[in-house]
């Protein structure tokens, strides 16, 4: 109905299947559509980066709002020359974060109960395929909260590398 209402442009955030239906309906009137259908937002760290700033930005982008943002950092690619130092910085900072409902918590709960199972499955699959948890791990999923998890050496075949985690 919104596509056919005469709006100048429509923005949609949601599943790819629904986005296709929205785009199809909007095409009837040539209504421009902006769609955001999730993804695996990558963060890239090059050798000349300010590693402290990059580590803080990657961690904030991944963990803010318990990782439940459409533009949250889900993958980080780091040049080999600085990878160990970067991982150490992220590990140190992430280890201090705590979820919870009290005022001094770093972030809150996972807001969609079904998402907890997806988060758990992604962590388990990555670890089962040879990834390493340098912060947290399987034990970090404690509904409705998920403690910080930082995975390294995750193979590209793992679900966590190409499916949106959203948490």
Image (cartoon, rainbow, N blue to C red):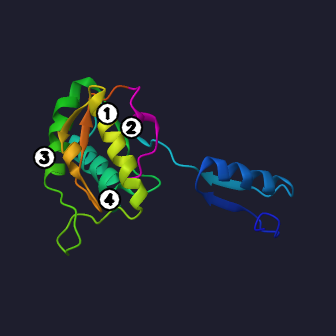
In this view, 103 is above or below 80: below
Residue 5, percent across and down? 81, 70
Distance in Å between CA atoms under marks 1 and 4: 19 Å
Residue at image mark 3: 92
Q: Would residue 92 be visible to someone looking at this image?
A: yes
Mark 2 and mark 1 in contact (Cβ < 8 Å)? yes
Of marks 2 and 3, the one in the foreground: 2
Residue 146, percent across and down? 26, 55
Mark 4 lies on a secondary structure that is helix
Distance in Å between CA atoms under marks 2 and 4: 16 Å
Q: Work out whether mark 2 precedes mark 4 in sequence or the reverse, and give the earlier one.
A: 4
Span colored in magenta: 156-167
Residue at image mark 2: 160
Local crowd size for mark 1, using a 10 Å CA cut-off: few (<14), some (14–19), many (≥20): many
Mark 2 lies on a secondary structure that is helix
Q: Work out whether mark 1 precedes mark 4 in sequence or the reverse, and give the earlier one.
A: 4
Residue 57, percent across and down? 30, 50
In this view, 109 is above or below 58: below
Residue 145, percent across and down? 27, 60
């Amino acid at each position: 109905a919104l596509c056919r209402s005469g709006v100048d442009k429509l923005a949609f955030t949601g599943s790819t299947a629904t986005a296709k239906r929205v785009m199809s309906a909007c095409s009837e009137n040539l209504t421009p559509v902006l769609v955001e259908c999730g993804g695996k937002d990558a963060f890239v760290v090059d050798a000349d980066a300010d590693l402290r700033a990059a580590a803080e930005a990657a961690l904030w982008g991944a963990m803010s709002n318990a990782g439940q943002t459409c533009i949250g950092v889900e993958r980080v690619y780091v040049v080999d020359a600085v990878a160990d130092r970067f991982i150490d910085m992220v590990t140190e900072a992430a280890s201090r974060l705590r979820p919870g409902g009290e005022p001094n918590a770093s972030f809150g709960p996972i807001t969609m109960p079904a998402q907890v199972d997806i988060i758990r499955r992604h962590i388990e699959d990555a670890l089962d395929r040879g990834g390493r948890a340098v912060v947290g791990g399987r034990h970090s999923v404690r509904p409705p909260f998920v403690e910080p998890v930082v995975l390294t050496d995750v193979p590209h075949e793992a679900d966590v590398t190409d499916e949106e985690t959203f948490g």
